[in-house]
Image (cartoon, helix red, strand yellow):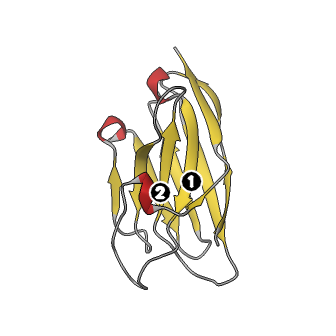
Amino acid sequence: QVHLETSGGGSVQAGGSLTLSCVASARTDSRYPMGWFRQAPGKQREMVAVTSLTGRTSNYADSVKGRFTISKDYVKNTVYLQMNGLRPEDTAVYYCAARSEVAAGSENIYRNVNHYNNWGQGTQVTVSS
């Protein structure tokens, strides 16, 4: 089981920036494909950005391309989400996720909520107009 500790949410005005962080920890010093998802009230959880085990391969939702950047510190086993140009429609609870079932060295990325079996506690991001 992987424990994910998320931080960095908050409230900003439209056009502002926030950075989310998620530290993964487990009994073994393993690395995982990880991602950021979000869920707005009354909506389903959706992918924001995902990255591979190594962090070399990433993928983004169309709605955030060019504004958000996912990055990974392999040594610290931490994934970040840099969010620039925030819009009111980005308001949601953001969740970090990790997939513990993966082959070592794999560059696969996983876009679907159901691909992940470990979730952080969620952090609120609120963007006002």
Image vertical order of residue 70 relative to residue 52, above or below:
above
Distance (Cα) linking label 2 and label 1: 6 Å
- How crowded is the residue under tag 1: few (<14 C-alpha within 10 Å), some, or many (20+)? many
User: Is 1 situated left or right of 115 in this image?
Assistant: right
What element does badge 2 sit on?
Answer: strand
Q: Which image quadrant is residue 112 in?
A: bottom left
Q: Which image quadrant is residue 26 in?
A: bottom right
Lower sequence index among marks 2 and 1: 2
Choose between 19 and 50: the one closer to the eye: 50
Choose between 124 and 55: the one closer to the eye: 124
Choose between 97 and 17: the one closer to the eye: 97
Q: Residue at x 51, y 49 (%)?
A: 81
Question: Residue 114, position in %: x, y?
Answer: 43, 57
Image vertical order of residue 127 relative to residue 60, above or below:
above
Q: Which residue is mark 1?
A: 96
What element does badge 1 sit on?
Answer: strand
Question: Do labels 2 and 1 touch, CB within 8 Å?
Answer: yes
Q: Residue at x 49, y 68 (%)?
A: 99
Instruction: Name the residue furthest left.
Output: 62
Say which amino acid is labelled 2: Gly
Indicate which disc residue 33 carries.
none
Q: Which residue is mark 2?
A: 35
Question: Residue 6, position in %: x, y?
Answer: 66, 52
